[in-house]
Image (spheres, rainbow, N blue to C red):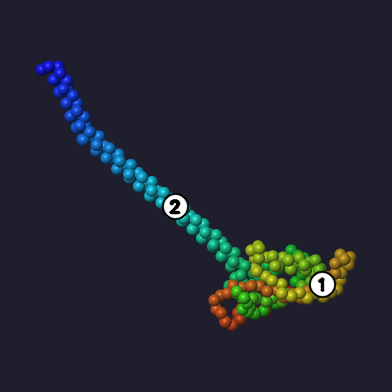
Amino acid sequence: MSSKLKMILVAVVIVVVALLVWFFLLSPLRGDIKATETQIEQERTRLSQAQIQLAKAEATREEGRTNQARLLELTKIMPKTEEIPSLLLQLQDLADQSGITFIAISPGKSNEGAGGRILPLSVEFSGTFFNVSDFIYRAEQMVAGPGRLLAVKSVDLSPGGADMQGGVSPQLTVSMQIYAFLADDGQTGRSASPATETNEMTSQ
């Protein structure tokens, strides 16, 4: 056999082996690689969608927490029930901070108002003009605490007798009407709450 023929046979064998390797090894392997790449891309897409959904869920949960906190604040500001004992405690705290001395607090009967209900309170106390001004300011700012939403409806001042601080700031007796606001309990047109019995706080 001539060397030329041998070279041709070797070349044919190499080509045949190369074709066999291609069809039986490399081609399936390339298909597997392509399928794997497609699967990886699909998983990346699913992961991206899952991350978007997770971000939305986190935002919704955070919004829910914020709304719950706001609802709790609103419940403190405008409760559905009168909660007179806690209201009297808050007013006493304001009195201590502003330096006035309560004589009496008489809650009235709640009645319907715009956007809710109103609980009127007739308040009598003594203090100087500056004490009275400070009490009014604190009462109307108590909502920022957050505390009850209050509004001073009327103020009547009269001399209280002995002067304080060497006559610089006279003692006054004050009659004041305060409105405490309540949330609408959904019972429009109902009769006034039976829980508004008159309460008196007498200074010791």
- Determine whether, in the image, residue 70 is placed left or right of residue 92: left
Q: Which residue is mark 1?
A: 172
- Determine whether, in the image, residue 63 is placed left or right of residue 137: left
Residue 45 place in picture, x, y as percent: 38, 48
Q: Amino acid at mark 2?
A: Ile
Residue 168 place in picture, x, y as percent: 87, 66
Viewer-proximal residue, 114 or 92? 114
Viewer-proximal residue, 166 or 153? 153
Label 1: element kind? strand
- Using the image, determine if residue 69 lies above or below residue 45: below
Bin the neighbour count of mark 2 within 10 Å (Cα to Cα): few under 14, some 14-19, many 20 and up: few
Residue extending furthest toward the left: 1
Between the residue at mark 1 and the residue at mark 2, the CA separation in whole angstroms equals 65 Å
Image quarter (top left, top right, bottom left or bottom right) of the C terminus: bottom right
- Using the image, determine if residue 69 lies above or below residue 2: below
Question: Residue 90: which disc?
Answer: none
Which residue is rendered at x = 77% and y = 67% of the image? Answer: 133
Sequence order check: which comes first, mark 1 or mark 2? Answer: 2
Which residue is rendered at x = 29% and y = 43% of the image? Answer: 35
The reply to whether residue 71 is in sight is: yes
- Using the image, determine if residue 174 lies above or below residue 99: below
Q: Which residue is mark 2?
A: 52
Bin the neighbour count of mark 1 within 10 Å (Cα to Cα): few under 14, some 14-19, many 20 and up: many
